[in-house]
């Protein structure tokens, strides 16, 4: 079943509308969609390495635009989305303290998690909830997401066939590692946003 899904994804990556799908997934993942754009970006580059930099650029622009939507959701929909998010992380009682600390370290938080497989939507919404400087948010997003997508694309462009062979050989293992990484990211961000962590001054 996993192999069929992989083969299907590779086929879709060569579809004439694949770039549109990549843009849609990258945009949605930054604000509400659970699946990261890597699942489309990687097979697209492997399917046609001549379009590597176009693919990475589309992914970057769409992801940052989606991140701005996520920021807006957090900023304008605090009661509907922001507050439940803070309660989930156990920060509602010390939100003022949390807000000050997040804004102090916000650029580093956005930059760090923008590089990881961790669901970026959590960071974009949290940035809006805490009213992190929009300029800081956008710059950190462009740098981190750009580094992530272009480094992955560059490695695939340079070592495409061997990497594709490795992925196909150990597809099951890579799938397990991917989901473990996502779960680990949730645990890390939950600890990072805990009101008891050391950088919170109150």
Image (cartoon, rainbow, N blue to C red):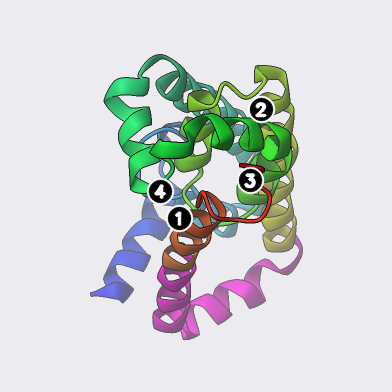
Image quadrant where residue 82 sits: top left
Residue at screen point 32% across, 29% down: 81
Q: CA distance from mark 3 to mark 1?
A: 36 Å
Q: CA distance from mark 1 to mark 2?
A: 25 Å
Mark nearer the N terminus (3 vs 1): 1
Q: Residues within 10 Å of mark 1 (few under 14, many from 20)?
A: some
Q: Is residue 22 visible?
A: no
Q: The N terminus appears in which quarter of the rendering?
A: bottom left
Mark nearer the N terminus (4 vs 2): 4
Secondary structure beneath dot 2 equals: helix
- Against 125, residue 18 (above or below) is below
* Residue placed under numbered mark 3 in the picture: 200
* Residue placed under numbered mark 4 in the picture: 89
Frontmost of labels 4 and 2 is 4
182 lies left or right of 1: right
Secondary structure beneath dot 3 equals: loop
- x, y percentage for residue 153? 68, 53
- x, y percentage for residue 54? 66, 36
Q: Magenta residues?
A: 158-181
Residue at screen point 34% across, 46% down: 88
Frontmost of labels 3 and 1 is 3
Q: Which mark is residue 137?
A: 2
* Residue placed under numbered mark 1 in the picture: 39
Between 102 and 174, which is closer to the camera in this rendering? 102
Q: CA distance from mark 4 to mark 2?
A: 21 Å
Residue at screen point 37% across, 57% down: 9
Mark nearer the N terminus (3 vs 4): 4
Predominant SS of the magenta segment? helix
């Amino acid at each position: 079943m996993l192999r069929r899904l992989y083969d299907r994804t590779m086929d879709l990556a060569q579809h004439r509308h694949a770039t549109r799908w990549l843009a849609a997934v990258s945009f949605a993942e930054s604000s509400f969609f659970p699946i990261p754009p890597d699942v489309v970006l990687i097979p697209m580059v492997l399917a046609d390495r001549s379009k590597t930099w176009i693919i990475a650029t589309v992914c970057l622009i769409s992801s940052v635009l989606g991140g701005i939507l996520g920021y807006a959701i957090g900023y304008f929909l605090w009661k509907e989305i922001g507050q439940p998010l803070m309660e989930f992380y156990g920060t509602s009682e010390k939100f003022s303290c949390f807000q000050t600390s997040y804004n102090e370290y916000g650029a580093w938080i956005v930059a760090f998690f923008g590089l990881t497989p961790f669901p970026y939507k959590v960071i974009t919404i949290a940035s809006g909830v805490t009213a992190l400087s929009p300029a800081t948010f956008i710059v950190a997003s462009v740098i981190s997401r750009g580094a992530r997508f272009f480094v992955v694309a560059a490695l695939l462009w340079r070592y495409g066939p061997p990497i594709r062979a490795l992925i196909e050989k150990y597809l099951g293992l890579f799938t397990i590692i991917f989901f473990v990484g996502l779960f680990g990211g949730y645990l890390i961000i939950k600890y990072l946003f805990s009101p008891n962590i050391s950088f919170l001054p109150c």
